Image (tube, grey):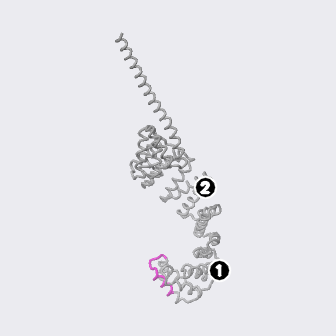
Amino acid sequence: MLRKAAVLMTVFVSLVCAGCESMTDAKKTAQQRWQKATSAIKLNLAQQQYDDGKYEQALKTVQECISADPQIPQAHLLYGKLLLAESDGQKALEQLQSAVELDQQLDEGWYWQGVAAQQLGRGQQARLCYGKAMALEPSNIDYTLAVAEFYAAQREYEQAIELLEEKIEVMPGEISLKVTAADLMCRMGQNKRAIELYRQAMLMAGGDSDITEALGYCYVFSGEWKPAAEIFNKLSTQCKDRQKEKLYMEMAALCSVNCAEYGQAVSCYNKLSVDQRANAEIWMKMGQAALGAGAANRALMCGQKALDLNAGYADAIALIGCAQYVSGDYLEAINSFEKISAGQENATLAWLMKARCYERLGRTDKAGLAYRKALETNPHSQLADFLARGQSR
């Protein structure tokens, strides 16, 4: 009986112990499941904090998420992005590598790993990672632009343009592809191709001011002054930012002068002078435009205004002299040009104009001396060559 009772007690104790172990395992399982559930919640919260720009809070939350469950690739991805925002490229790269190790198909992980590698100056690694991201999601515009910009940073411009043109064929409605391609073409001096893409993008974007401005500068780079003047004049009338408006008017004026639309240039400079009445250069440029438009009296007035604001302003004196010459005041013009004939920048012009004034006055001897002086001041200029040919005849 005693032996039987001992056996029964042993069995009972074993069952009780087994039950205790089962309860412990159940608790562990429940704890793990709870941690996974809360880590998913924490990840969503961290993502929301990241989207709201609350990086410090997001960093703390995502660290708690990874601590609870280190096997979530999206958590490592977000952690890497946050570290990049903190300019900690090396640690960011490590987290992003962990993300793609957990999920090789995580295209965003490859993309951000490329960003981190590029920031660390690891070009080959960045190229590989960007390529992986684009292979996984070939229609993702951000990936395409990142690869194109990477090529451009490596001075592989043709490859960048080729990639963008391939994507434009597949996705002709994507404005960003056209603008980026046009920017690169403009940088390479392929202005005609760039202008066409800018125009397409501008029409698609409904006259977006940034694209329109880029098109305007591209016209300037290609020497197409008239359409450039039209664009900058239009931008100046539509712009609500006063500083930008001034810049657009200055560009419109410059382009108008270069395409001989002097009246339009005068109008632009006149508007600019309202807020810049003490700016000698604005008055001088307005006077030059007025002279081009045949308004010698207005040019003279503008030149004098510029000189009053900046005593000894050589360009203003040259403008006054030219206005006097056009008006037939040759003696006054000679006096004006005499003031700047010893200066380095305007000497050639001064002696040339003095020679012409003397010619108009019938003083051929003095005109000849003035022409020779003009040659001496700049013997290698195109003007000097022209004068030399004239003197040899």
As drawn, 374 above or below 192: below
Disc 2: which residue: 208
Q: Residue 61 at x, y = what percent?
A: 49, 44
In this rendering, position of residue 373 left or right of residue 233: left
Residue extent of the magenta highlight: 368-382
Residue at x-position 46% and y-position 45%:
79
Q: Earlier in the sequence, mark 2 or mark 1?
A: 2
Specify few, some or many for label 2: CA neighbours under 10 Å numbering under 14, 14-19, or 20 or more: few
As drawn, 166 above or below 258: above
Residue most extreme to the top: 1
What secondary structure prevails in the magenta region?
helix
Specify few, some or many for label 1: CA neighbours under 10 Å numbering under 14, 14-19, or 20 or more: some
Mark 2 vs mark 1, CA separation in Å? 41 Å
Q: Residue 354 at x, y = what percent?
A: 54, 85
**The magenta stretch spans residue 116:** no
Secondary structure beneath label 2: loop
Disc 1: which residue: 297
In this rendering, position of residue 174 left or right of residue 31: right
